[in-house]
Image (cartoon, rainbow, N blue to C red):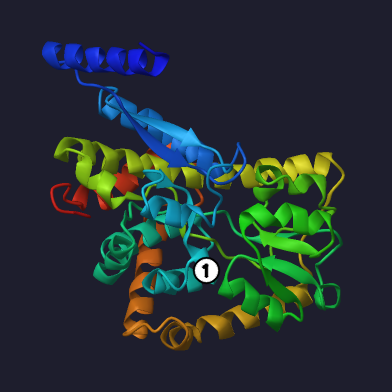
């Protein structure tokens, strides 16, 4: 008998033994995180994994796969096709597949409170029938969202005045930042998170519009010389760390889906919490390393604020003409109401723990999803 046959025989014997004794076999949940270790996404998935294991008495165990399996752009198709059960998605990268999700994403410049933006985005998506339908069409089930901290500029020269920004090529995470760059006389360059470090280090771009947490998570701290902390602002709240392959979701029992939903509240909260806390930690590290940390000039802020106000007033037109959405004005009003609601629930003048934020997400969103129907 060869080794493979012996292995199969032993496995079969263990399965039969476990079934006979009534012991449930642990099942791996394969989740890919397409960014380097140490990111907010990895932190959130690890917190989720521990919570899920506890809630299922060890029957569901999360196994994290690195970006060498699937990068940020490949994860969408990989999850759809069942290569993994779940994965870290940045929804901004998939406008043609997810036009409904693009509307709240286009409202990025509303983002001042990451906990509130994650809560508003999560509630908006899971209670929006067209939003859920476009994910089901791609064999995925949405399970809430996380958010970055507010965006700044991480670059290789000072960018604090209109003159310093003129002509600069800056990585833009989505349409809102590309339009902001154009209004400020700069050029927005669309790059995935996996491409930023190389582009900055090789001088292809002059910097990146990103939260300061990215100084460590994608190692921009090794190439950036200057950080502007209070401009352009806005959040990426389309970070999707908990969604799963629909076939995998259907394979779970009702009890397992309930545990998954409750644990997902912590996964989203912990990811957001990590991004928030990393902002302060990274700015401290940057100063210690000799990186110049600036605030934008009053003239630049005035120009920036005017550009943002003009852009927000134009989102309905963008959603209708670019993404083909119907009832854009009503959907924008609804999302703005959700942002206001969540800013009241999770104000930034309190130091939150991830567990405290998760409890609010759980009570307001995830406890209201029916595990016997949702996503099936």
| In this picture, residue 236 sits left or right of residue 52 | right
Q: In the rendered view, would you say 205 is above or below 304?
A: above
> Can residue 52 be seen by looking at this rendering?
yes
Residue at 77% from the left image edge and 71% from the top image edge = 169
Q: Position of residue 194 (x, y in %)?
A: 64, 53
Residue 333: % across, % down:
36, 78
Point out residue 134 in the picture as x, y percentages from the top left corner: 32, 67
Count of residue discs: 1
Name the one closer to the observer, 91 or 314. 91
Corner quadrant of residue 18: top left
Corner quadrant of residue 235: bottom right
Q: Quadrant of the N terminus?
A: top left
Position of 92 with respect to 165 (left or right) is left
Question: In front: 38, or 286?
Answer: 38
Instruction: Name above or below for residue 253 compared with residue 239.
Output: above
The residue shown at (31%, 57%) is 139
User: Which quarter shows the C terminus?
Assistant: bottom left
Identify the residue under disc 1: 108
Most foreground residue, 341 or 135: 135
Compare residues 51 and 120 and report the one nearer the observer: 51
* Left or right: 305, with 255 as reference point: right
Whether residue 353 is visible to the viewer of this picture, yes or no, is no
Residue occupying image coordinates x 56% and y 50%: 71
Residue 172 x %, y %: 65, 67
Residue 202's quadrant in the figure? bottom right
Q: Is residue 359 left or right of residue 162?
A: left
- SS for dot 1: helix
């Amino acid at each position: 008998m060869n080794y493979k046959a012996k292995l199969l025989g032993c496995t079969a014997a263990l399965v039969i033994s476990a079934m006979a004794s009534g012991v449930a076999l642990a099942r791996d949940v394969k989740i890919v995180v397409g960014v380097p270790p140490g990111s907010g996404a990895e932190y959130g998935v690890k917190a989720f994994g521990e919570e899920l294991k506890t809630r299922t008495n060890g029957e569901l165990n999360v196994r994290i796969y690195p970006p060498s399996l699937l990068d940020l752009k490949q994860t969408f198709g990989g999850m759809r096709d069942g290569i993994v059960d779940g994965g870290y998605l940045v929804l901004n990268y998939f406008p043609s597949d997810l036009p409904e999700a693009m509307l709240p994403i286009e409202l990025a410049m509303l983002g001042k409170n990451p906990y509130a933006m994650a809560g508003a985005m999560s509630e908006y998506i899971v209670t929006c029938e067209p939003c859920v339908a476009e994910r089901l069409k791609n064999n995925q089930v949405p399970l809430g969202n996380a958010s970055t901290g507010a965006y700044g500029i991480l670059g290789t020269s000072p960018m604090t005045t209109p003159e310093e920004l003129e002509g600069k090529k800056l990585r833009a995470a989505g349409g809102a930042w590309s339009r902001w760059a154009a209004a400020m006389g700069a050029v927005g360059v669309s790059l995935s998170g996996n491409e930023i470090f190389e582009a900055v280090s090789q001088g292809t771009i002059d910097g990146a519009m990103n939260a300061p947490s990215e100084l460590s998570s994608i190692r921009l701290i090794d190439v950036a010389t200057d950080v502007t902390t209070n401009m352009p602002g806005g959040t990426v709240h389309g970070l999707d760390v908990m969604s799963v392959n629909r076939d995998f979701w259907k394979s779970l029992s009702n009890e397992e889906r309930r545990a998954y939903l409750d644990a997902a509240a912590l996964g989203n909260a912990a990811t957001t919490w990590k991004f928030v806390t990393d902002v302060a930690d990274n700015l401290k590290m940057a100063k210690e390393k000799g990186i110049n940390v600036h605030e934008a000039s009053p003239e630049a802020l005035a120009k920036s604020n005017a550009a943002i106000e003009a852009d927000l007033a134009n989102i309905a037109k963008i959603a209708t003409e670019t993404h083909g959405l119907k009832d854009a004005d009503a959907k924008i009003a609804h999302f703005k109401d959700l942002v206001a609601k969540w800013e009241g629930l999770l104000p930034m003048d309190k130091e939150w723990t991830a567990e405290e934020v998760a409890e609010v997400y759980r009570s307001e969103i995830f406890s209201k999803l029916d595990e016997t129907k949702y996503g099936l």
